Amino acid sequence: MGGNKEAKTQHKRLTPYPVFVFFFCSFLLLKPVKLNARQDDVEEDNDEYHPVNDIYQTAFWIYDCYLTPAQQARLGDGSHGIMRNLTKYRNRRNGPGFAHAVDEFNKVIKELKANGEITKNAKHLRHPTYDLTCHILYQVYSRTVAHQADALNNYQAFSNYVYGEINASLVNEFIAKTNITSKSVFMDLGCGIGNVVLQVAAQTGCESYGIEIMETPCKYAKRQLKEYATRMKAWSLPTGKVHFRHGDFLDTAANDMYTTMTRADVLLVNNYAFDATTNHSLAQMFLDLKEGTKIISLKSFVPKHHKINQRTLDMPESILKVEEFEYYSEAVSWTNNSGMYYVSTVDRSRLKPYYDALYSK
Ligand SMILES: *[C@@H]1O[C@H](CO)[C@@H](O)[C@H](O)[C@H]1NC(C)=O
Ligand SMILES: *[C@@H]1O[C@H](CO)[C@@H](O)[C@H](O)[C@H]1NC(C)=O
Ligand SMILES: *[C@@H]1O[C@H](CO)[C@@H](O)[C@H](O)[C@H]1NC(C)=O
Ligand SMILES: *[C@@H]1O[C@H](CO)[C@@H](O)[C@H](O)[C@H]1NC(C)=O
Ligand SMILES: *[C@@H]1O[C@H](CO)[C@@H](O)[C@H](O)[C@H]1NC(C)=O
């Protein structure tokens, strides 16, 4: 299964305190919590799981997203009542006080749940906001991948096998730029551990696919998907239709993803470190894409000097209309600097004048 044994033992599900009942699902802690120990700083280490903070943040998300103002009033707010107690005892690292506040919170939530009010509110939410999505995906990641991240770093630097991550806020921008909705089909070619695929599915409810050639990240993607489905259900949210495949996206005969690709509305290709052959072969496949498909990439598939003429009519570069955008610093895992990304839209109408000229001769 990869990962090291020691880490696994340490993170075994030791439960049972404080169990937090919400919708259909309980929060089980992944490791024993010493609430009085100084170990729950959020800043300490992003890959380390912090159960107290998880519960704390979850309580505030429930409060913000699932309750009406009248229902919120029963829990107080940042300055008084149960919500104030949660913050106060967490900040003071007072275990019993925090646990008591969680109990009080649960009492109110259980009551609202029992009379169907929360489920009614959840229906209005439809898809989670970007922020809530980040929280849920953090829950998913910390339970499936975080403590075994070392196994993922065994890649060959600067090859087709580089494992690179794109920041959730940049993915959020991709969603807006390419207009992904619940009716869209999205696909990530080289999806790694599947974060982008899950984020897009969560935020939009669309069909979302990922294919990954490396075995270990793909295994994690599938694990994340399982946890994601459970979590989304617990939050009463639709999962979208999500699939991961282990395979080579260039191997069109051996994977059913090729068919899916030809009906995709949006493709993501993190081709930052692709070699020339992979880049070229993939570009040839774009000739089979449907009209209007948008391809998001980290390097352009069309050289700036490319010109459409009778000699280049059959090349994939000629059917792509490219727009260039800038991403801010810290948006991608392989560099701290800002950089450019590209959205190419399949547009064959631009070839028509050239074909007309050809046939009118
Ligand atoms: C806040 O915590 C204190 C100490 O546990 C408790 O006495 C008080 O009732 C709590 N307030 C609310 C609104 O639950
Ligand atoms: C996104 O969709 C809306 C409504 O369908 C449309 O008005 C808008 O032009 C689209 N934007 C892009 C970038 O395609
Ligand atoms: C990728 O391939 C296309 C098509 O062969 C080519 O036009 C483009 O310059 C290549 N891009 C890079 C970054 O190698
Ligand atoms: C992603 O971006 C957000 C906001 O732009 C930033 O707070 C966060 O630190 C970034 N994450 C990484 C891993 O760079
Ligand atoms: C990014 O910045 C951090 C701290 O500022 C540094 O530790 C890290 O090595 C940098 N990473 C890259 C890829 O430059």
Image (tube, rainbow, N blue to C red):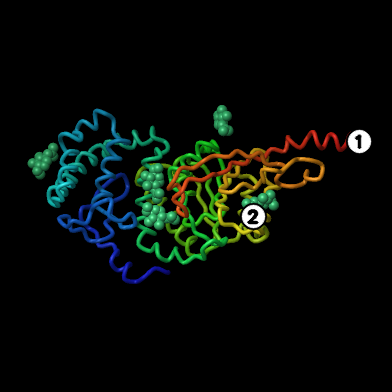
- For the residue pair 358 and 148, the one nearer the viewer reads as 358
Q: Is residue 233 visible?
A: no
- For the residue pair 184 and 168, the one nearer the viewer reads as 168
Badge 2 marks a residue whose secondary structure is helix
- Neighbour tally class for label 2: few under 14, some 14-19, many 20 plus, Cα within 10 Å: some
**Which image quadrant for residue 319?**
top right
Calculate the distance from the C-alpha at mark 1 to the C-alpha at mark 2: 35 Å
**Which image quadrant for residue 47?**
bottom left
Residue 281 percent location from the top left of the image: 68, 56
Is residue 8 depicted above or below 231 in this figure?
below
Name the residue located 43 percent from the left edge and 42 percent from the top edge.
Answer: 169
Residue 330 percent location from the top left of the image: 43, 48
Please, what is the three-letter code of the amino acid marked with disc 1? Lys
Residue 361's disc number: 1
Cβ of disc 2 within 8 Å of ligand 3?
yes
Q: In the picture, which quadrant includes the N terminus?
A: bottom left
Q: Left of 208 or right of it: where is 346?
A: right
Q: Left of 283 or right of it: where is 38?
A: left
- Neighbour tally class for label 1: few under 14, some 14-19, many 20 plus, Cα within 10 Å: few
Label 2 belongs to which residue? 279
Badge 1 marks a residue whose secondary structure is loop
Name the residue located 51 percent from the left edge and 45 percent from the top edge.
Answer: 339
Residue 248 percent location from the top left of the image: 60, 60
Please, what is the three-letter code of the amino acid marked with disc 2? Asn
Q: Is residue 87 visible?
A: yes
